[in-house]
Each structure stands twice: as C-alpha cells, then as structure tokens.
Image (cartoon, helix red, strand yellow):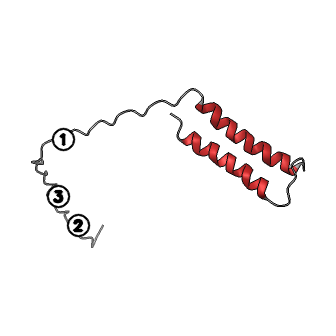
Amino acid sequence: MPGCIILSVPKSKGRKKSKPSSRPYVPKKERPKPKASPGWYPYLMIGLMLVGVAIIVLNYMNLIFSTGPQNLWIGLGFILAGFMASTRYR
C-alpha cells in the first residue's frame, strides 16, 4: 500500500518472578467433626412442620375457634421452629 508507514511493535520485557515467601508453612488446625444428631431428631423436625401446617389448615377450615390471626401466627411459628431445627440436623 503506497503511503503506509509500518511501525515495529516494541518487545515485551516479560514479568518478573516473585520471590518465595520467607514465612514457614503452617498447616490449618483441623476442626473436630460435629456430633451426629439423635435418631429422634428428624421426627421432631417433620412433626413441628406438620403441626404448623395442620393448625393453619384447620384454622382456614374454621375447625379451630379463633377471633383473630393468632392461630395463623402459631402455625407459622411451628413451621419456623421445624425449619430452624432442620438447619441444625447433622
């Protein structure tokens, strides 16, 4: 191509290697394994959740006498307790 100027690309200097660290390697402490949950624990979790669902369903079917939303909150409390118990299951 007439009138084009070709420029040369400068050569890369490369990366300098870092010096190895002078600190000695210290292995991490091993944590003790958590204890296994007792055999009745899964039944407790499922039971709490089912009781909560039953309270809410019976409240909406008007089989539980209530003047306000107390039974709904009680049922949600049981479900929440079952869910929190399930996060601690090992």
Specify the quadrant of the image occupied by residue 84. Answer: top right
Q: Which of marks 1 and 2 is in front?
A: 1
Residue 67 percent across, percent down from the top left? 86, 60
Residue 13 vertical position relative to residue 63 in the rendered view, above or below = below
Residue 41 percent across, percent down from the top left? 59, 32
Q: In this view, does 36 lie to the left or right of 64?
A: left
At label 3, counting other C-alpha atoms closer than 10 Å, the crowd grade (few under 14, some 14-19, many 20 or more) is few
Find out whether the residues at labels 3 and 2 contact each other: C-beta distance under 8 Å. Answer: no
Q: In the image, what residue type sits under mark 3?
A: Ser
Q: In this view, does 33 lie to the left or right of 51?
A: left
Q: Distance between the residues labelled 1 and 3?
A: 37 Å
Residue 11 percent across, percent down from the top left? 16, 59
Residue identified by numbered label 2? 6
At label 2, counting other C-alpha atoms closer than 10 Å, the crowd grade (few under 14, some 14-19, many 20 or more) is few
Q: In the image, what residue type sits under mark 2?
A: Ile
Q: Residue 49 carries which label?
A: none
Q: Nearer the viewer, mark 3 or mark 2?
A: 3
Residue 9 vertical position relative to residue 64 in the rendered view, above or below = below
Mark 1 vs mark 3: which is more N-terminal? 3
Residue 54 percent across, percent down from the top left? 79, 42
At label 1, counting other C-alpha atoms closer than 10 Å, the crowd grade (few under 14, some 14-19, many 20 or more) is few
Q: Which element carries disc 1, helix, strand or loop?
A: loop
Mark 3 vs mark 2: which is more N-terminal? 2
Q: Which element carries disc 3, helix, strand or loop?
A: loop
Q: Residue 12 carries which label?
A: 3
- In this orientation, which residue lies closer to the viewer: 45 or 68? 68
Residue 56 vertical position relative to residue 34 in the rendered view, above or below = below
Residue identified by numbered label 1? 26
Mark 1 vs mark 2: which is more N-terminal? 2
Residue drawn at the location 67% of the way across and 36% of the way down:
46
Residue drawn at the location 13% of the way across and 58% of the way down:
13
